[in-house]
Amino acid sequence: MATYAIGDIQGCYDEFRRLLDQIEFDPVNDRLWCAGDLVNRGPDSLSVLRWVKALGEHAVVVLGNHDLHLLAVAAGVDRHHKKDTLDEILTAPDRDELLDWLRHRPVMHVDEKKDFAVLHAGLAPQWDLEQAVACAGELEAALRDPGNEEFLNAMYGNEPARWSEDLTGIERLRFITNCFTRLRYCDADGTLHLHEKALPGTQPEGVLPWFQVPGRRTADDRIIIGHWSTLGFHVGDNVWAIDSGCLWGGHLTAIRVRKKKPIEVFAEDCIGYRQPG
């Protein structure tokens, strides 16, 4: 039995299936970890959702920003963006079943046997792994609440930009959401810089990739992330970043997750599709 983690699929269903063929993924015996953003911008998000959902307990999906955007659009609290490709999901006969399944996915998965955690974007440097799991649970509870429209309507925004134990209500949830689904950079005191998206080396002085902040409390924990397509496949600081930009004409990347042995890397070229712009 093998466990594979795969980067942001974002509706690139053909590339996804070719990569699974390349790694000889066995849906009966193997496990698949998806690092968020199953949907949007690519041409066939509906097929991706259906296929991964059908894996049942053989798939772990952590939620990304595009997955949350789909839930917000479906709830009527956010508008379509120009480049969205969500209509096929929103008009599908199994729409409600798919959306209910999606909003019950975690935002963080920790596997003690593999000694790995997987999440979409990042963690506040002030959090240790135990606190990160607790914060993930708060966000998951808000998403699964029958009245989650109120949260979805208020989750957007860049403030507050720094963690405090005193944060409460929607401000606390918004900060947690931004870490798990949007974070790339912050400064040495843990203030989030959510507007910075490009390669390391282009950011302002004093702003660092979140995983390079000195004193980060999860520095000894092995973490798999997606989200950062401009970074591409990257291994360092106990972080494996596996969004290699399939949507933008790059690759879809999977890694085989093991506790001790080296991690094998597999990539599938994006053929025939590139997100405009």
Image (cartoon, rainbow, N blue to C red):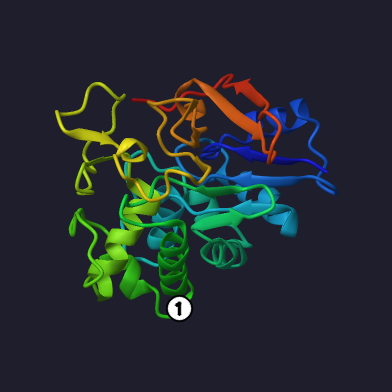
Q: Is residue 246 left or right of residue 202?
A: right
Which quarter of the picture shows residue 100?
A: bottom right
User: Looking at the rendering, in which quadrant would you find the C terminus?
Assistant: top left
Measured as percent of width and height from the top left, residue 58 is found at 74, 53
Q: Nearer the viewer, residue 83 or 24?
A: 24
| Residue drawn at point x = 24 percent, y = 60 percent | 163
- What residue is drawn where x is 36% and y is 73%? 149
Look at mark 1 in the image and give the residue it sits on: 145
Question: Is 108 rendered above or below residue 23?
Answer: below
Where residue 23 appears, x then y in whole percent? 76, 29
Q: Is residue 175 above or below residue 43?
A: below
Q: Nearer the viewer, residue 165 or 50?
A: 165
Q: Is residue 91 visible?
A: no
- At x 56% / y 56%, what residue is drawn? 109
Residue 87 located left or right of residue 166? right
Residue placed at 28% from the left, 60% from the top? 175
Residue 131 % position (x, y): 41, 64
Looking at numbered disc 1 in the image, what kind of residue is underneath it?
A: Asp
